Image (tube, helix red, strand yellow):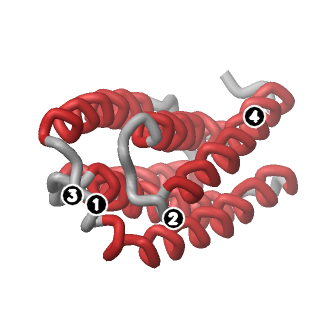
Amino acid sequence: MNCTCSLSANAQRYLAEYRTILSDMINAMESAGLTNSISGNFISRMLPHHRAAVEMSRNLLRYTTDLTLQRIAENIISTQTESIAALERVRRTCTRTVNARSSVAGYNSQVESIIDAMFARMESAPAGNNIDCDFIREMLPHHEGAIRMSRTALQYSLCPGLVPILNDIIKSQSTGVRELRELSGSLACR
């Protein structure tokens, strides 16, 4: 990550909290107990992913005065909290859906590549004194990672209860990506 020597006190506090959230998410996703259930594996990794989005948004709300970004962050908190609840509801049933070893190996390989790329982009997101732009640069790869993970899971045999949740993730986070990119342009984030 970047040197914090020229950052304001607020930017340093924001960045320190972001780094803690990111580290916790990485640790939880990397230590998720993987099984022979693609549905269960997806849920085990997506739960800490969603929780991180909620915490990232709460962190932003302590600092931003941009009304559009406040609305986006509040929407992330709402939709991700609903998705966490939905994932928790289907978790027990979905972990019973077992896949062939070759399917699990293929899925895990694809998802690990997606996750590694997402982690790398989030860890290297430029930090500055514009916290709004920092958040956008951090959340874009986070959302894009969830979309890619969900689309990848849909290529495999899944627990039926998980499919609508995946479609909701793709829809809500695609909207979020579009909104963040538009706002990035109007805020002149680089």
Identity, as a three-letter code, of the amino acid under mark 4:
Arg
User: Which residue carries the number 2 mark?
Assistant: 55
Q: Quadrant of residue 134?
A: top right
The residue positioned 81% from the left and 59% from the top of the image is 71
Q: Amino acid at mark 2?
A: Glu
**Taking the image as drawn, is residue 6 in sight?**
no
Q: Position of residue 79 (x, y in %)?
A: 66, 64
**Which is more foreground, mark 2 or mark 3?**
3
Separation (CA) of disc 4 from disc 3 = 30 Å
Mark 1: give few (<14), some (14-19) or many (20+) Cα within 10 Å.
some
Which amino acid type is shown beneath numbered disc 1?
Thr
Residue 60: horizontal and vertical position, in percent? 63, 58
Label 1 or label 3, whichever comes before in sequence order: 3
- Nearest to N terminus: mark 4 or mark 1: 1
Q: Mark 1 sits on what residue?
A: 97
Badge 4 is on which residue? 178
Could you say where residue 190 lies in the image, as x and y percent from the top left? 66, 21
Q: Is residue 113 something one can see in this rendering?
A: yes
Rendering coords of residue 140 (x, y %): 59, 36
Nearest-to-viewer mark from 4 and 1: 1
Q: Quadrant of residue 111?
A: top left
Decide: is 20 above or below 190.
below
Disc 2/disc 1 C-alpha distance (Å): 30 Å
Q: Which residue is depicted at the point 30% across and 32% down?
A: 116
Question: Circle 3 — which element?
Answer: loop
How many circles with numbers are drawn on the protein?
4
